[in-house]
């Protein structure tokens, strides 16, 4: 009997649940798997499993960076010149992704691996010591909620494209996958249902996580992801409030210089900066910076395949904007943001929170601004670091600032969709700006429907 692609990969990834089907003469206890009844029996077991969940989250095909780079490629018109040989990325930058694209397949598979790992931790939460229980559950739900959000906005229509209550998102699997039967094949939940689940997970995570937690998920990491989700939905009051919670907690500050917000070029190891609300940790022996892989020149550990257009730099940044200096010439132009092979992958930066709060105040024009700071004040915080003065804070000003501040960090596609901005001549809600459901999953699971256009 065929098994679905989701479940095949989940089972391969989870060494915790190996099942022997040998005959009696061959019934030898496996050394590389643990029977389900013997797994996650103690608090320590669950804590170790949580570390494994973070490892899955940091896959190059997930929060290691590749999905964000692929979103940049789909949004690209004239900023990125692609010279790579990976056909899968050539398809992406040409907006002609095939349903057999292995990069897309890997995003799907690794996303569900991380979700299943989180589900295992959540299912065993009663085994955790009382003093650690809230934190561990909060971290697992942060991971699950964040991954569901990123999967649904890549593999489903935008929240504002038609009806999210009928448009198909991705399958919702909320319990550990330990066996696959014909009756366990899952269908795609609606976009609205996936957003609802992501919000529920992240809201609970925020309530249970501590304010500080080393480089693991914190209360602010959950609030920051909620701010991003609500902004994508157009729920500006909730988005502004969530961003405000991150800012006012006071645990993060903007770095003195813009480029200081990113790992130092060429250094052996890159640590978190003062404005990293959440980052994926990369070391010389563990982790992977998927941004550096393609955006970094060969001198700095990358392939040098994604070159930044000098003409785009010149027309986008003014000479007075310090961010124009965040590019380097290594035969071609590259972004300095990812010129460190072992630099941590920044997922949520404080600067984004200021821009979200500013945008929400600009859109809502409340009698009392969210956080007690006007859109102009928040915009000025971000622009002053770049050496710029600020006199107006229209919605157009703020959206432009997002492009300047967050360039090549995976925001362009999703911002275009939520603001209904066409990408060149391609409509913002075109079918080819949505990832296809992997064909291998369609072939294996009769309950999975393909996206329009594929």
Image (cartoon, grey):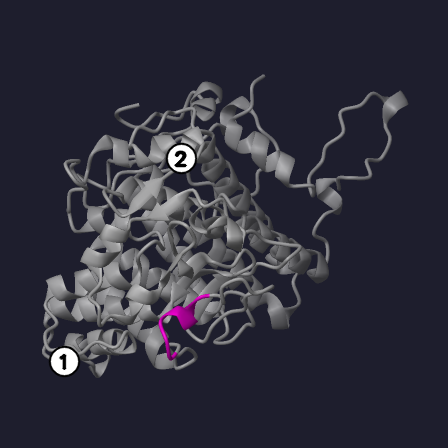
User: In what element is the residue under mark 1?
Assistant: loop
Quadrant in the rendering for residue 247: bottom left
Distance, label 1 to label 2, CA atoms, is 46 Å
Q: Residue, x 32% and y 70% (percent of image)?
A: 351
Label 1: few (<14), some or many (≥20) within 10 Å? few
Please report the bounds of the magenta region as a residue range. Answer: 256-262
Total numbered labels placed on residues in the image: 2
| Above/below status of 301 relative to 436 | below
Q: Residue 368 — which label? A: 1
Q: Position of residue 298 (x, y in %)?
A: 51, 49
Q: Residue at x 52, y 46 (%)?
A: 60
Relative to 371, say whether 142 is above or below.
Answer: above
Q: Position of residue 230 (x, y in %)?
A: 27, 58
The residue that disc 2 covers is: 89
The answer to whether residue 153 of the structure is visible from this angle is no
Residue 111 belongs to the span the image colors magenta: no
Residue 89 point in image, percent of width and height: 40, 35
Camera-side residue of 327 and 215: 327
For the view shown, which residue lies furthest in the right direction?
25
Q: Judge left or right: residue 277 versus residue 282.
A: left
Tell me which corner region of the image, top left, top right, bottom left or bottom right, holds residue 318: bottom left
């Amino acid at each position: 009997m065929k098994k679905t692609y989701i479940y095949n990969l989940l089972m391969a990834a989870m060494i915790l649940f190996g099942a022997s089907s040998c005959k009696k003469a061959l019934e030898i206890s496996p050394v590389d798997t643990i029977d389900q009844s013997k797994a996650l029996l103690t608090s320590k077991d669950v804590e170790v499993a949580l570390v494994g969940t973070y490892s899955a989250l940091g896959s190059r095909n997930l929060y290691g960076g590749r999905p964000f780079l692929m979103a940049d490629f789909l949004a690209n018109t004239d900023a990125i010149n692609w010279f790579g040989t990976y056909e899968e990325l050539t398809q992406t930058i040409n907006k002609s992704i095939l349903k057999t694209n292995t990069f897309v397949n890997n995003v799907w598979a690794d996303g569900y691996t991380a979700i299943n790992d989180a589900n295992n931790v959540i299912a065993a939460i009663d085994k955790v010591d009382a003093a650690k229980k809230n934190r561990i559950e909060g971290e697992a739900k942060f991971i699950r909620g964040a991954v569901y959000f990123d999967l649904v906005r890549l593999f489903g229509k935008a929240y504002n494209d038609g009806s999210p209550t009928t448009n198909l998102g991705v399958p919702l699997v909320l319990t550990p996958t330990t066996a696959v039967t014909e009756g366990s094949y899952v269908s795609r939940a609606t976009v609205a249902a996936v957003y609802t689940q992501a919000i529920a997970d992240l809201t609970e995570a925020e309530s249970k996580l501590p304010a500080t937690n080393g480089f693991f998920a914190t209360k602010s990491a959950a609030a920051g992801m909620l701010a991003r989700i609500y902004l994508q939905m157009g729920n500006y009051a909730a988005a502004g409030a969530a961003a405000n919670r991150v800012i006012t907690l006071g645990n993060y500050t903007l770095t003195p210089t813009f480029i200081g917000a990113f790992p130092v070029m060429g250094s052996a190891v890159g640590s978190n900066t003062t404005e990293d609300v959440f980052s994926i940790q990369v070391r010389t022996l563990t982790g992977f910076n998927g941004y550096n892989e393609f955006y970094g020149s060969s001198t700095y550990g990358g392939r040098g395949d994604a070159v930044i257009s000098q003409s785009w730099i010149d027309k986008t940044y003014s000479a007075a904007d310090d961010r124009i200096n965040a590019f380097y010439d290594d035969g071609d132009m590259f972004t300095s943001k990812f010129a460190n092979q072992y630099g941590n992958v920044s997922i949520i930066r404080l600067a984004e929170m200021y821009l979200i709060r500013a945008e929400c105040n600009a859109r809502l024009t409340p009698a009392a601004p969210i956080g007690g700071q006007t859109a102009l004040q928040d915009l000025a915080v971000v622009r002053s670091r770049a050496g710029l003065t600020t006199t107006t804070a229209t919605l157009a000003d703020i959206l432009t600032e997002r492009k300047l501040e967050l360039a090549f960090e995976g925001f362009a596609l999703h911002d275009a969709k939520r603001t209904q901005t066409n990408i060149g001549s391609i409509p913002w809600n075109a079918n080819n700006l949505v990832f296809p459901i992997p064909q291998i999953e369609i072939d294996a699971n009769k309950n999975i429907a393909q996206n329009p256009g594929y």
